[in-house]
Amino acid sequence: MPLALLALAISAFGIGTTEFVMMGLLPNVADDLGTSVPTAGYLVSAYALGVVIGAPLLTALGSRIPRKRMLVWLMAVFTVGNLASALAPTFGLLVAGRLLAGLPHGAFFGVGAVVAARLVHEGRQARAVATMFLGLTIANIIGVPAATLLGQQLGWRATFLIVAAIGLVAMASLARLIPPLPAEEHTGLGRELRALGNRQVLLGLLTTVFGFAGIFAVYSYLASMMTEVTGFAAGSVPLVLALFGIGMTLGALAAGPLTDRALRSTLYGSLAALALVLTAFHFTAQVRWAALVTVVVIGAVGFLTTTPLQMLVMNKAQQAPTLAAASNQSAFNLANAGGAWVGGLALSAGWGWTSPTLVGAVLAALGLAVALVAGVLDRGAHDTSRIVARSGEGDVERATGATAPATGATAPATGVADPATGAAAVPTGDRIG
């Protein structure tokens, strides 16, 4: 894998750390700024709102900017947002800082996913995208616990200063390691918007909303479930969350190769497994060792869906994949908010602390149903990486001066024309239909 993917992973690590660290710092922020913990919770919502707004907006505004420059500028906004959060003298300005820090989140992962796919040859695009997302999962194992501990010991402002420093390191890494990649040729805002309206793209986004809402219906109340049902002490909750992060990392590691081999099969299997394991959690939550094993499995199968969903919307957007990929990040955050809300409704109805597991299972099953319908409507579609990477590999080779070695083999023609260029497509042997 190209070293440039490390720069994307470092950036993802910083983004993942600042996204989730606020949950553990809410009491500290509330005490320092003289507000309540529920009110401080708006800081979480402000970041999520920034993601939802910024993903389509910044991606659209930057559609003509060369990809490398776009990534550096997005991390610059991220760094300024975290620095503003660290220096905010009032709660209102801290909310504004969190909103600013969230704006580049979705756009970065959207542009970053397309760049990652363009850095490698066909058949390895999903692994490249999964490598970028690996930084996000490692943030949940190392970055968030470490930043939370730092904030509790030195004050919450120190946490955001450290995250801002990570942002500077990410900017330097992107500037140094990412090759000069031009913006996609013939891809303007109008074309990106038309691609976003593709039926398969919309169904992919809907699958993301339902599938990930199933995860967050449970994850949002996991700490309370572990203490109230499983019987763990509050001090053990960080360990449980770390196990969830380990599961996410395992899922990310498996997602790349599996998605490159068979995208839709990986998506169907992961969503079905998620629905089953969430149902099982309703019962295993009563037993400590079984609950811990289930938490790891939920993290693994849940994050196993991330890469195929991202690659699916990128493929179906054809030669204008960036806005679709960024919008998928908005869908993830809508799932975050929606899943927590629906899980909370079950708790408010008095159905018990384990009721969100069944709610999550239903949501995951709905995601699977949408994915299956999309697959039936799209039978005969070819491999996910073909369209994303066709125009990209030449860009990378021209930018780096590298030329792919000849294999001496000639790929058989299929007679299928690329819908965007009219050029004959070269198959890789993988299928997503």
Image (cartoon, grey):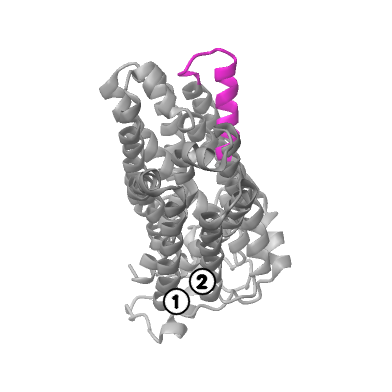
Determine contact: label 1, label 2, CB under 8 Å.
yes
Q: Which residue appears farthest toward the left when viewing the image?
A: 289
Label 1 and label 2: CA atoms lie apart by: 7 Å
Expressed as whole percent of the image width and height from the top left, the position of residue 257 reads: 35, 54
How busy is the neighbourhood of tag 2: few (under 14 within 10 Å), some, or many (20 plus)? many
Relative to 289, is 313 above or below? below
Q: Nearer the viewer, residue 396 or 164?
A: 164
Residue 392 at x, y percent in the picture: 50, 73
Q: Which mark is residue 72?
A: 2
Tell me if residue 354 is in the magenta stretch: yes
Highlighted range, magenta: 335-355
Q: Is residue 134 above or below residue 399?
A: above
Left or right: 146 in relation to 334: left
Left or right of residue 45, residue 219 in this image = left
Secondary element at tag 2: helix
Reading the image, the residue beneath label 1 is 175
Q: Tell me if residue 277 comes above or below residue 265 in the rendering.
A: above
Q: Nearer the viewer, residue 228 or 125?
A: 228
> Residue visible at 59% across and 27% down?
342
Taking the spot 55% from the left edge, 12% from the top edge, the residue there is: 350
Classify residue 132 by image quadrant: bottom left
Relative to 378, is 7 on the left or the right?
left
Q: Is residue 336 above or below residue 387?
A: above
